[in-house]
Image (spheres, rainbow, N blue to C red):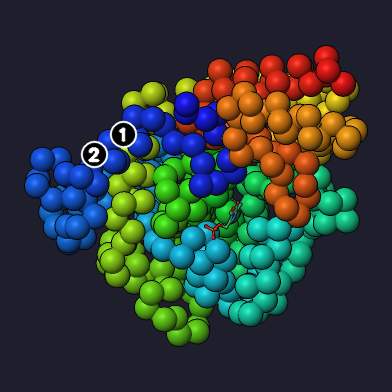
Amino acid sequence: MKKHNFSAGPCILPQEVLLKASEAVQDFNGSGLSLIEMSHRSKEFVEVIENARALALEILDLEDKGYKALFLTGGASMEFIRVAYNLLETKAGYLNTGTWSNNAIKEAKLFGEVVEVASSKEEGFNHIPKMFGVPNDLDYLHITSNNTIYGTQMKTFPKVNIPLVCDMSSDIFSRQLDFSQFDLIYAGAQKNMGPSGTQLVIIKEDILGKVTRKIPSILDYQIQIAKESMFNTPAVFPVYTTMLNLEWLKGLGGISVIEELNNKKAQLLYSEIDLNPVFKGYAKEEDRSTMNATFTLTDEKLKDTFDAMWKEAGVSGINGHRSIGGYRASMYNAMSLESVGVLVDVMSEMERKA
Ligand SMILES: Cc1ncc(COP(=O)(O)O)c(C=O)c1O
């Protein structure tokens, strides 16, 4: 039986994407070769990566606006380093909204001064700081649009006149935004795009080339752009699967359509969390993520019963991150409203039993 997969990442992907990806592993488009045994420089694969890069820009409405899309390797964590390497000359600003921004800060400190413009650490990262100043003399401001572990999501973004860099790993392609307000967006594929092993980086080219340090080739965004994401062997299978997923999203009608579904799923689950006395939400209401809903039991003694019930219902992957415990239900693009309904039914059944 196929599980209702609420895993935070690697995560659920559309069934048709999984099917096409698995077919390509056997035989890529009738070529007599598996996708993963053909040259990344073959005409067939170059078309794949070009298509994936173009689709990413198209879906985000960033075509012809000075942006380049790259599929690189090393995960979003590699971009913590590349961003600082390429952009941090003296001082950068970081908004600290959780573990991942904290990790990005740690890496950036190896390259220059880091100003933490605001932090919600004292309150266990249960909200997004709203009122904070951003000095004008920063090389860039780094934010994390969705905090996968704590289940908070930025609903508005600071208006700044320095480059705005966004780690969008866990909510890219999930909601409509003016993506041109960001100068650099990066996202690990394994949340809403495809398998782990690649990350999408979208860069406004004119922010590059301003630091004086020498940059190793593989870490240099300008070289990666010049080599069209082929400086070294790209992650062919993750890039192909991401391409399929972006085609799937475009076929559905793009971000506006998926956003509507994502909002419905989030409303269904959060209203259960709010109405059911057995559960309590972790994130402050106004900052709740539509992608990752975090909650706890109000009585820990119910844990064994609840765990047995959701497992029995075919629900998978709702254990909270080890750093905060409790539960986390991730509802990425491919998750159906019906699957969220299954979890909600288990939660109301838990209330009846408690
Ligand atoms: C928001 C965010 N940023 C960065 C990362 C790190 O990604 P990776 O494991 O691809 O380095 C994660 C992983 O969960 C994440 O959720």
What residue lies at 39% left-to-right and 24% top-to-bottom?
253
| Image quarter of residue 112 | bottom right
Q: What crowding class fits label 2: few (fewer than 14 Cα within 10 Å), some (14-19), or many (20 or more)?
A: some
Residue 294 seen by the camera: no
User: Residue 89 location, x and y as percent?
Assistant: 58, 78
Q: Position of residue 83 (x, y in %)?
A: 53, 67
Q: Secondary structure at mark 1?
A: helix
- Residue 30 visible? The answer is yes
The quarter of the image holding the C terminus is: top right
Quadrant of the image where one finds ligand 1: bottom right
Judging from the image, what secondary structure is the residue with disc 2 in?
helix
Q: Check disc 2 and give the amino acid type.
A: Glu
Ligand 1 has an atom within 8 Å of the beta carbon of the residue at disc 2:
no
Q: Residue at x 84, y 51 (%)?
A: 124
Contact (Cβ within 8 Å) of mark 1 with mark 2: yes
Residue 10 in percent (x, y) is at 51, 47
Disc 1 residue type?
A: Leu
Position above or below: 274 against 211: above
- Judging depth in this view, the residue of 41 and 225 nearest the camera is 41
**Which residue is rendered at x = 52% and y = 75% of the image?**
85
- In front: 80, or 323? 323
The residue indicated by pointer 1 is 19
Q: Which residue is mark 2?
A: 23
Q: How far apart in space, not on screen, are marks 1 and 2 (Cα)?
A: 6 Å
Determine whether, in the image, residue 289 is placed left or right of residue 222: right
> What residue is rendered at 52% in x and 23% in y?
336
Query: Residue 92, image x and y in percent?
Result: 66, 69
Q: Quadrant of residue 6?
A: top right
